[in-house]
Amino acid sequence: MNAIYTAIATSAGRDGRSVTNDGRLDVTLARPKEFGGDGAGTNPEQLFAAGYSACFASALQLVARRQGVDAADASVTAEIGLHPADGGRFTLSAVLRVELPEHLQGEAGRALVEATHQVCPYSNATRGNIPVELVVE
């Protein structure tokens, strides 16, 4: 399959740096205090939350345009949970809180968010792999 865009980043773990090949993203990584770190940098879960919320918000705008509705004032907040699992493993969960404009409240808004969940690349990547809860606010 041919990609229409490929993002490239290099990291050395939870403590260090994560840098994209074009240098536009260069962040200090640090374990959160909940993991015994000093919390002095960002962490993979925060980066995932930022990416998922931005991607879902963009997909929401695309789906809204296709449906002929205005969702310009919508916003998406992603909450990414990190959970311990058996055998020393860890899993993720996601809650997407979608704030919609007044005219998209109720069933119309819920249908828009559900349709977006089918289009968003992050939703398609996580489907069946982690629990994702959609909350329309």
Image (spheres, grey):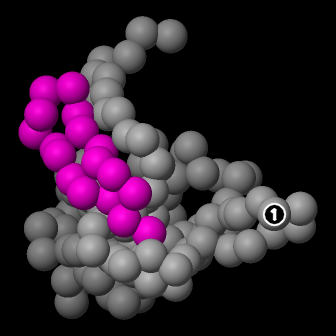
Left or right of 107 in this view: 66: left
User: In percent of the image, x 32 and y 33: which residue is there?
Assistant: 9
Q: Tell me where the magenta segment starts and ends, as one range.
A: 15-31
Residue 74: image quadrant is bottom left
> Which element is circle 1 on?
helix
User: In percent of the image, x 74 and y 73: which residue is there?
Assistant: 84
Up/down of 94 relative to 51, above or below: below
Q: Position of residue 87 (x, y in %)?
A: 89, 62
User: In percent of the image, x 44 and y 76: which residue is there?
Assistant: 37
Up/down of 29 relative to 104, above or below: above
Q: Position of residue 52 (x, y in %)?
A: 38, 58
Residue 64: image quadrant is bottom left
The residue beneath circle 1 is 88
Residue 103 in the magenta stretch? The answer is: no
Q: Residues within 10 Å of mark 1 (few under 14, many from 20)?
A: few
Left or right of 134 in this view: 39: left
User: In percent of the image, x 69 and y 63: which residue is there?
Assistant: 91
Residue 101: image quadrant is bottom left
Outermost top residue: 2
Q: Viewer-proximal residue, 75 or 105? A: 75
